[in-house]
Amino acid sequence: MQHFPIFVALAGRRVVLSGGGEAACAKLRLLLKTEAHLTVFAPDPAPDIAAWAAEGRLRLLRRAMEPGDTTCAALFYAADEDVAEDARTSAIARADGALINIVDNLGDSQFITPAIVDRDPVTVAIGTEGAAPVLARSIKADLEERLPTRLGLLARVGKRFRCMAAALPAGRKRRDFWADYYYEAGPRAVEGVETGDAEARAQGALNDLLARHLSEDEAPGHVFFVGAGPGDPELLTLKARKLLDTADVVIHDRLIAPEILDLARREARMISAGKEGFGPSVAQSEINDLILQHVKAGAQVVRLKSGDPGVFGRLDEEIEAVSAAGQPYTVVPGITAAASAVAGIGQSLTQRARNASVRLLTGHDMKGFADHDWTALAKPGEVAAIYMGKKAARFIQGRLMMHGADPATPVTVVENASRADQRVIATSLSGLAAELTAAQLSGPALLLYGLAPRAAAEVIPELPRQEVL
Ligand code: SAH
């Protein structure tokens, strides 16, 4: 980010602009929305500028800007649309300590003016660092359409009510109250109402809501065991997305992609429970305690697990702890790594005439490398999705071959399934261990035993991020 967005307090401060043409008018139209004292230098001003001056909305000096003209100015706009003149005026303003913007000269400007969606006091500023003004305009148009025109009025009335709302305890209760006002009761109260009456209606809605929220008991805490899917944020369920939006606390595994964590409510407390394969991990009992501590304090706790919480996610241990403490919980399923990995190679987990069942296996369990029914797995046509199998690959390979599996059985390793850095290694049982060592995978990887990437050339280009090694 080369430009950091801020909102500058301009009420009562000096803003100076040099220029009298189109560019000057465009900037002034925005600046006139503020409570700044505007001074414009223009020997030959456009009629609009002269009219604003006549209305007393800005001070117009019909001459070129000179040293001393920008004393105490907070902002300066060089809008003469003339490279030499803009350089001259901006040098004067810079010497006077004003922040300068030169129209259509990003490189020499100290700040830029964003595209603005104005629902005063709600203001949305959109910037693209000069990269894509067209995009900024289309985002603006989109927001203009989506944000209720009365939002500003609701916010103004809401602002005056803030001290009244302090009667509600800070935290979720107060947040629920405001959400109710802005999204439900407020818009309902002012819909189709004449401007003059709308403020009173909004005020009435606030009074009623406050009385109702004050009389309601504190909502109890709740634990949501939520599947975050394999990594691509677009593979989150809508439920997961909504819960992240409203969570008070998010306790997440280390595997969860940062793009997904970014979706959590900004005020939510993010706690990494750091469980990961063989790596250093937080003890399960500590995670249980953490969940309980927050849910007992009345928080909406999202326990975010990679993939599906019910697949190698130690879900039961956490559910038992939560229910033993008498706390309510809900499980929200997610897309498990196996589902995502087969999608990544254009295959399915089961197929008529090939395999009528599929196994989800773990490469290691609490005792070390996990043992399985190798004899059954070694039969032709079997398919297994092996989780946490990177380190155990040599062991699995050895056991299966020992039990008579065909060394040519296809095995596909999918690393970082669904993520931008997804990698696919297509090998066979006999080549598995060596190929895995050679590939030096650093991300989570799933072994698909008995499946090769779909060979059909026409499928591969359709699969995003497909890289067959
Ligand atoms: N509950 C998770 C699995 C947790 S166990 C799920 O349903 O997917 C962790 C293992 O899952 C990793 O060792 C890896 O084998 C697998 N895994 C998780 N995310 C993955 C991804 N994006 N790509 C490949 N494998 C993944």
Image (tube, rainbow, N blue to C red):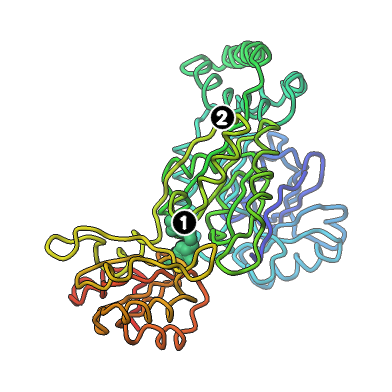
Image-quadrant location for residue 160 = top right
- Please state the horizontal and vertical placement of residue 404, each as a whole percent of the image: 26, 79
Q: Quadrant of the N terminus?
A: bottom right
Discs 2/1, front? 1
- Please state the horizontal and vertical placement of residue 237, each as a whole percent of the image: 41, 46
Q: Which residue is mark 2?
A: 151
Which amino acid does the dot numbered 1 rest on?
Answer: Phe
Q: Is residue 230 above or below residue 271?
A: below
Q: Is residue 168 left or right of residue 23?
A: right
Q: Which residue is mark 1?
A: 312
Q: Residue at x 12, y 63 (%)?
A: 353
**Observer able to see residue 419:** no
Q: Is residue 333 left or right of residue 457?
A: right
Which amino acid does the dot numbered 2 rest on?
Answer: Leu
Q: Residue at x 49, y 18 (%)?
A: 188
Q: Residue at x 43, y 54 (%)?
A: 311
Q: Is residue 9 above or below residue 415?
A: above
Image-quadrant location for residue 120 = top right
Q: 10 Å neighbourhood of mark 1: few (<14), some, or many (≥20)?
A: some
